[in-house]
Amino acid sequence: MSTPTVLRFGVFFQGVNFSTVWTQPDSGPQTDFESFRRLAQTAERGLFSAFFLGEGLRLREHLGALHQLDVAGRPDAQTQLAALAAVTSRIGLVATQNTTYNDPLDLAHRFASLDLLSGGRAAWNVVTTDNAWTGENFRRGGYLDHADRYRHAEAVVVAAKALWDAWDAPLAGSADSADSASWSADDPSTVVEVDTGHYRATGRSRLPQSPQGRPVLFQAGDSPEGRDFAARQADVIFSAHSAFDDARAFADDIHQRTLKAGRPAGDVKIFPGQEFILADTDAEAEEKARWVRREQVTPQTAIAFLENIWGTELSAYDPDGPLPEIDPVQEVTGETRGAGFRAAQAKTTADAWRERARAEDLSIRELVIRLNSGRGFVGSPSSVAATLQRYADAGAVDGFNITPWLIPSGLDDIVDRLVPELQERGIYPTAYEGETLRENLGLRPLQEEQDARRSA
Ligand SMILES: Cc1cc2nc3c(=O)[nH]c(=O)nc-3n(C[C@H](O)[C@H](O)[C@H](O)COP(=O)(O)O)c2cc1C
C-alpha cells in the first residue's frame, strides 16, 4: 500500500465575506491586531504551515451602498503579515495580491521584503480578480478581459521570479554576505524586463535572497487558463474543490496539467479551502453546525442574498416567509459591484430557488442557509480525523486551508483536539520540518525544483 500523504493546514481569511462570525464578546473588530495575533499564534501551536489572507481591493457594494453585512474593512494583507511576522517564528505568511492592478517590480520587492524580514516565511497568493469595478480604484481602470488578465498575470509572475532570482546571494547578515556575489551593473542577466502588452518596466533587484530563495507562490483561479497558469508557475494551488470526489478529480486534472507543463506532478501542492465544525459527538457537531449557519445567514443577510439575484430591494419580505413571487428586475447579474454572482441568469436562478423552496418547504432564510451549507467537515474530532484519513490515503489533497468561522477562538478545538488525532494516525506533522515556508509545505528546495523542471 502506498504511504498516505502527510496533510498540512493553513488558515484562510477571506477578503470580504458573510461567513466569518465576529459577533462573540471577545471577537473584537477586524481592524484589531489582537484577533489576528491570537489566531496566528494558535495556528502556530498547531504546526500550521500557513496563515493566509485573502484580499479584496474594493469593498463590495450592494444596491448602490456599502455591503454592511459583509465582514469589511481589514488592513492591507502585507502590512498585517509583517506585523504578524514579529510575533510568530515558524508559520508561513501568505498575502493574496492581485496581478492586474499592482506594479510588478514594486510588488515583487514588497514580497522579497516580507520574505527576508520573516526569515523565509512569505508567500504570494496570485490572483487576477474577476471584477472590472475594482479597476475603478486604479489609474489604468478595469481594462483587461479574462484571457488578457492571465497573459498579464503570467508576465508579472515571470518578472517577479526573475527579480528574486537575480540577486543570488546568501542570507543577508550572514557572515559571508558582505563579500558575496550580488548583481552587477555590467551583467545584463540581472536586468529584469516586464512587458505584458499593457505594461512595460525595467528594473533590478533591491534585495538579496531570503533563506527560502524566494517567496512561495500560491495561485487561486479555477478556469482552464487559471489551472494551466498554476501548473506552469505555482508551488501551491488554493482551490474550492474540497468534496472528496471533486478533490480527487481536481488533483488528477492538476497533475496532468503539471506534467504537461514539464514539471513532476507532485511539485504543485493542492490546498482546498474548508470549514471544520467540531464538537464532542457527531450529533452535537450537527447541532453546532445548525447554529453556525444561522449566525452566518442572519435575516438581513438572507434578504440581501436574494436581492443579488432580484436586483431590487426586498426588505418588505419576511425572511421566515416564502420567496417573492415577483420576478427579478434584471436579466443577468453583473460581474461588477461584487454582487458575488458572476453573470447568473436572474430569472432562471429565481425560478430554481422558488421551485426548491416549494419542494422542500423552505423559508427565504432556510433556503439561503441550504444554498450556503455545502462545505464543511462536521463531526467529533475522531470522525473528522477518519474523514481526513480518506483524503490522505487517496492523495486527493496535500492539505486544507481552513476558514475559521468564529473569531478569535475558531482554531482552538482544531489545534487542541483534531491535530493530536491526526498525528496519532501519522497523517499530520509532529514538528515543523524546517524554518522556512518552503520546507514546512513539503516543497523541494528551490534549486532542486528548478533542476527537476529542466530535466522533466
Ligand atoms: C479559491 C479561490 C480564492 C480566491 N481568492 C481571491 C481573493 O482573495 N481576492 C481576489 O481578488 N480574487 C480571488 N479569487 C479570484 C481569482 O483571482 C480569479 O480572478 C477568479 O477566480 C477568476 O478566474 P478563473 O476564471 O480562472 O477562476 C479567488 C479564486 C479562487 C478560486
Image (cartoon, rainbow, N blue to C red):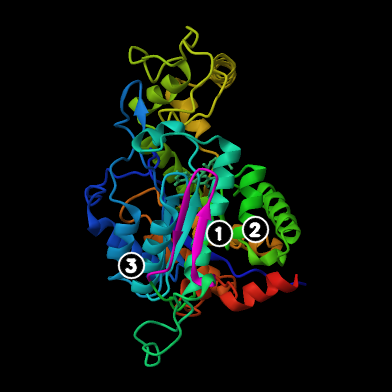
Residue 213 left/right relative to 409:
right
Which amino acid type is marked by label 2? Answer: Arg
> Where residue 256 sits: x, y (%)?
75, 56
Q: Is residue 176 above or below residue 127?
A: below
Q: Secondary structure at mark 2?
A: helix
Q: Any atom of ligand 1 within 8 Å of the CB at mark 3?
A: no
The residue carrying pointer 1 sits among few (fewer than 14), some (14 to 19) or many (20 or more) residues within 10 Å by Cα, namely some
Read off the residue under disc 3. 41
Read off the residue under disc 1. 158
User: Which one is closest to the eye, mark 3 or mark 1?
Assistant: 1
Q: Residue at x 38, y 24 (%)?
A: 304
Label located before the other in sequence (1 or 2): 1
The answer to which of 191 and 6 lies nearer the viewer is 191
> Where residue 84 sits: x, y (%)?
30, 65
Quadrant assignment for the C terminus:
bottom right
Chain part drawn in magenta = 189-206
The answer to which of 14 and 136 lies nearer the viewer is 136
Read off the residue under disc 2. 232
Q: Which of the labelled discs sits on residue 404, or is there none? A: none
Q: Secondary structure at mark 1?
A: helix
- Most distant residue in the front direction: 186
Q: Is residue 151 above or below residue 433?
A: above
Q: Residue at x 57, y 40 (%)?
A: 148
Residue 247 left/right relative to 99:
right
Task: Indicate yes or no whether the magenta region holds residue 250.
Answer: no
Residue 294 falls in which quadrant of the image?
top left
Q: Label 3 to label 1, Cα distance in Å?
A: 33 Å
Image marks 1 and 2: residues in contact by CB distance under 8 Å: no
Task: Indicate yes or no whether the magenta region holds residue 203.
Answer: yes
Res. 221 visible in picture: no
Which amino acid type is marked by label 1? Answer: Val
Quadrant assignment for the N terminus:
bottom right
